[in-house]
Image: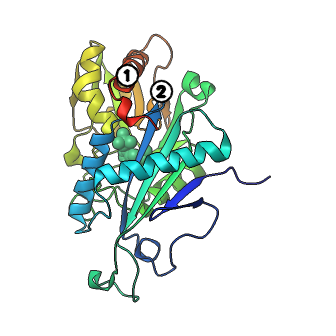
Amino acid sequence: MPAPYIQANTNGRLHSAHEPSLSPLNRGFLYGDAIYEVWRTYHGVIFTWDEHWRRLERSALALHLTLPLAPALMLVEIKRTVAAFRTETHFAGEVYIRLQVTRGGGAIGLDVALADKPDFVLLVQPCPVVAPETLRAGLKLSLATSLRRNSTATLSPEWKTGNYLNNILCLREARARGADEVVMLNLAGEVTEAAVSNIAFVRDGALLTPPLASGILGGITRALVLEKIAAAAGVPAREAVLRPEEFAAMQECCLLSSTKDLTPVAAIDGTRFKVGADTVTARLKSAFADYARAYASAHPELKA
Ligand code: PDD
């Protein structure tokens, strides 16, 4: 079966993602010398455009990397890429938009002075859908034991870089045990996050999620839930340093990310959590959908 069409845009050139794009000398390929962001649409509108752009700017600053385009111009490129995808595939549903920025290519060597100019690649595909069965039954997670999340004193998890090997290997370990996803600890044994999602728990009606200081990506979904959605749903929410010894005291668990919004977790290894309609997670998920609908109505300029 042919691979499903994915639309690419390399430095302004539209093409199928299955065709070659950047040079093999590109530093994103050689060293993971890159950053990225993922947006999705709700009701055809690019969700939380500014929040993701600001995080991209923070990642660029941390890596001393110059962004190739100003946000208004990148938004034009994104809309062109989504339009090309829709023309090619006749797909009218919600899309996933990935922007990868690399430091560029040049002579082989780590010195950033060897890089010519920043490159960008946009990728557009249908937004992955969490299967209804998974939403009903919840995800199975497993704790990574062979590796820990990068320390904030190394390549900080707060920077959304093109180097995900740590998470890839942790996820591999969990998948080898039959789990859907992984939970990573930091060097101090505190809970951090999953491979490409933040994590939260419900204890006695309140939502608890690890703080940035535990070494996590500052997720846009997580921040929205903490700062706006929990209050709208009447759920107390706060950051808390958490350890796996506390899993048994939690009634619910969920993953948070742009592509998953809130997805219930049924178990972390042998510890089971409540899932279903009558949960705090379900209430928050429904409040999140309300927020996304209101955002889409308020931002017609972000229609893609
Ligand atoms: N992942 N933690 C990590 C390590 C992530 O890569 C992501 C996002 C998140 C959630 O962040 P947000 O709510 O801003 O999407 C947390 C994206 C979706 C990805 O890599 O596909």
Q: Secondary structure at mark 2?
A: loop
Q: In the displayed orientation, state which residue is furthest to the right.
A: 1
Q: Residue at x 51, y 78 (%)?
A: 23
Q: CA distance from mark 2 to mark 1?
A: 9 Å
Name the N-terminal-most of marks 2 and 1.
2
Crowding at dot 1, Cα within 10 Å, few <14 / some 14-19 / many 20+, comes out as some
Residue occupying image coordinates x 36% and y 37%: 199
What amino acid is labelled 2 in the image?
His
Q: Is residue 4 visible?
A: yes
In this rendered view, identify the residue nearer to me: 124 or 212.
124
Q: Name the side, left or right, on which 98 lies relative to 33.
A: right
Q: Is residue 142 left or right of residue 153?
A: right
- Element type where label 1 sits in the image: helix
**As drawn, is 10 to the left or to the right of 189?**
right
Q: Which mark is residue 201?
A: none
Q: How many marks?
A: 2
Question: Quick one: label 2, few (<14), some, or many (20+) residues within 10 Å?
Answer: some
Residue 282's x, y, as percent? 43, 17
Task: Estimate the x, y position of residue 35 in percent, counting from the top left.
Answer: 35, 61
Disc 1 CB within 8 Å of nearest ligand 1 atom: no
Q: Is residue 245 visible?
A: no
**Residue 260 at what x, y percent from top left?**
47, 34
Q: Which mark is residue 43?
A: 2
| Display colour scheme | rainbow
Which dot marks residue 297? 1
The amino acid marked with disc number 1 is Ser
- The quadrant of the rendered image in which ligand 1 is seen is top left
Q: Is residue 300 left or right of residue 4?
A: left
Residue 135 rendering spot, x and y as whole percentages: 55, 25
Q: Are marks 2 and 1 in contact (CB under 8 Å)?
A: yes
Label 2 CB, ligand 1: below 8 Å?
A: no
What's the residue at 49%, 20% (across, down)? 275
